[in-house]
Image (spheres, grey):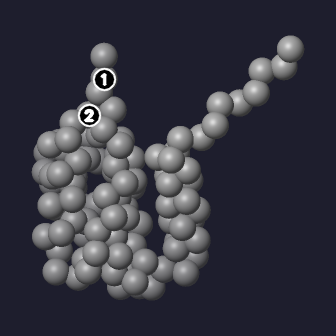
Amino acid sequence: MSQSAPFPTRAHAAQEKYALQAAHSLRTQSREDRRLAERIEHALCATGYGALRDVEVSVTASIVILIGRVPSYYLKQLAQATAQADPEAHQICNDLDVVKSN
C-alpha cells in the first residue's frame, strides 16, 4: 500500500505563493523597493528580538510581505508595526506563522 503525501494546508499554499512572488520580485524589484526592504530588515533587527532577524521581507510596488515564523503573536504584531512605521510602506501582508517552540 503506497502512502500519499498529505494535502497542503491553506497556510502552506499561501506561503508557497508568496515565496514564488518574492523570488519573482527579486528579479523585477525596483531600486526603491529594494531599499524599503533593506530598511525594514534593519528595523526588525534593531528591535532586539532575535526571532525577527529571520523574517524575510519582500517588497513589490511598496507592498511589503513578511514571511517566516515567529514564536509569539506579540512578535508577529511587532514585526507588522515595525514595517508599518516606514512611511514608504503602503500596504503590509503579514504572512508570519506563529510556531510555539517546545
Decide if residue 52 is on the left or right side of residue 34: left
Residue type at the position of mark 1: Ser
- How many marks are shown on the rendered structure? 2
Q: Which residue has dot 2 on it? A: 71
Residue 5: x and y, percent? 71, 30
Residue at image position (34%, 49%) is: 96
**Residue 69 placed where, x, y %?**
36, 41
**Residue 35 visible from this viewpoint:** no
Above or below, 3 relative to 24: above
When the figure is inspected, residue 100 is found, relative to residue 29, above or below; the finding is above
Q: Are marks 1 and 2 in contact (CB under 8 Å)?
A: yes
- Of callouts 1 and 2, the N-terminal one: 2
Residue 32: where, in percent of width, then height?
Answer: 35, 85
Q: x and y percent of residue 7 in the render? A: 64, 37
Toward the right, the furthest residue is: 1
| Image: 66 above or below 24 | above
How crowded pointer 1 is (Cα within 10 Å; few <14, some 14-19, many 20+) is rated as few
Q: Which residue is mark 1?
A: 101
In the picture, residue 80 is in which quadrant? bottom left
Q: Residue at x 39, y 73 (%)?
A: 59
Query: Which of 53 and 1 lies nearest the eye of the viewer?
Result: 1
Q: Is residue 61 above or below residue 68?
A: below
From the viewer's perspective, tell me whether residue 14 is left or right of residue 58.
right
The tag on residue 59 is none
| Element class at badge 1 | loop
Mark 2 belongs to which amino acid? Pro
Name the residue rendered at 29%, 27% in the picture.
Answer: 100
Category of crowding for the residue at label 2, using alpha-carbon neighbours closer than 10 angstroms: few (below 14), some (14–19), many (at least 20): some
Let me know if residue 40 appears in the view. Answer: yes
